[in-house]
Amino acid sequence: MTVHPTDLRRQMVDPFGRHITYLRVSVTDRCDFRCVYCMAENMTFLPKREILTLEELDRICSAFIAKGVRKLRITGGEPLVRKDIMTLFRGLKRHLDSGALEELTVTTNGSQLGRYAAELYACGVRRINVSLDTLDPDLFRKITRWGDPDKVMAGIAAARAAGLKVKINMVALRGVNEDEIADMLVWCHGQDMDLTLIETMPLGDIDGDRTDQYLPLSLVRARLRERFTLEDSAHRTGGPARYVTVRETGGRLGFITPMTHNFCESCNRVRLTCTGTLFMCLGQEDAVDLRAPLRASDGDQRLYEAIDAAIARKPKGHDFVIDRRHKKPALSRHMSVTGG
Ligand code: SAM
Ligand code: SF4
């Protein structure tokens, strides 16, 4: 049977009726930090030839947009350390201009924002997520191992000055930054930045023990309630966070709770690694290679077929468990592979 190209471009709907409208793309597995919950200090990175070129990344993103993706998030590793990364943003801007794409966003550790914030804005980026787990410079160095807190703070300031709306992502770590969460909330909301708290997920081998780091956000929420009034909010950004409004500050607080709460039923996302592997679920191993069909021809037909086959396999949900007995990650790949 021959399939007409326009049929191949139909919207992506998975077996559970979920429309796939959100693509997260990891553009590099490399990073200038070594956050303790994310990477081991001695990481082996992929050889350059395995990585999609910027042109190939543009082609895959464009194919997904043609198939109904409305929101694109560029992540990594650290996306802004990839050489010439602005070429990709400048290219993707055409999809914002045409209206095919609603939003182009970035998740970054903030280290390169001083350099790129204004250009990101010029490329049509309006909102970014910056990961910041502490305001204490010494603790920041401990958590990120290689990060420079002043550079990140200057980067956040540059982003705000450029007109970008900044949301701070903070991974809640037991015994590390748990006492700082309220202060972070006040700091963020004082500058009109939303804050989202993230539970650690058991992805990839790190140097330490993950069961030591895990702090359930149900507990964090209960503690914050002693000091703040948290009002349920219907606000959604298309991502997995659930929000409350903090009455005392007027700001928004998000919770991403893969471990304590199942956020799968409304999942609209798929994730592409920098080697062109599509993961249909952050918490499952099943994946589809898009690099071979991409490189097989200059036309996109095989790519569209591979995408359709992948979406037809999107699982209902994940089964993350921190294996306390074996102290092993639930999945062997690191978050820096799929970009969170
Ligand atoms: N380098 C960028 C950054 O740090 O924002 C983008 C990639 S990073 C992998 C994306 C997000 O995943 C960050 O907010 C980071 O804190 C979070 N993250 C990394 N490893 C994680 C883990 N094991 N559990 C939960 N969140 C994790
Ligand atoms: Fe790098 Fe982001 Fe992972 Fe930290 S969380 S090591 S900044 S990729």
Image: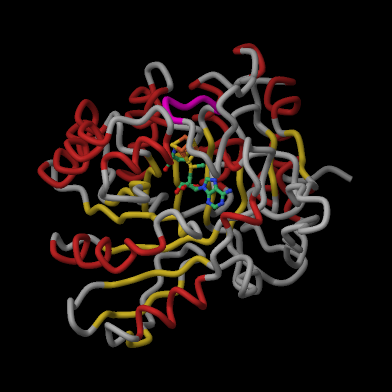
Query: Residue at position x 46%, y 59% from top?
Result: 172
In this orientation, which residue lies closer to the viewer: 204 or 235?
204
Is 197 drawn above or below residue 70 in the view shown?
Answer: below
Residue 250 percent across, percent down from the top left? 18, 78
Provide the major secondary structure of the magenta segment. Answer: loop
**Looking at the rendering, which quadrant does residue 142 occupy?**
top left
Tell which residue pokes out farthest to the left in this image: 161
Residue 297: where, in percent of width, then height? 70, 20
- Identify whether 296 is placed above or below 256: above
296 left or right of 222 in image: right
**The N terminus appears in which quarter of the rendering?**
top right
Question: Is 215 left, or right, of 49 in this rendering?
Answer: left
Q: Which residues are magenta?
A: 29-33
Pick the front one: 237 or 252: 252
Along the viewing direction, whichever of 47 and 294 lies nearer the viewer: 47
Q: Is residue 317 left or right of residue 72?
A: right
Q: Residue at x 32, y 63 (%)?
A: 195
Left or right: 45 in relation to 195: right
Q: Position of residue 127 (x, y in %)?
A: 29, 51
Residue 30 located within the stretch drawn in magenta = yes
- In the rendered structure, does residue 75 fall within the stretch colored magenta? no
Residue drawn at (68%, 26%) of the image: 294
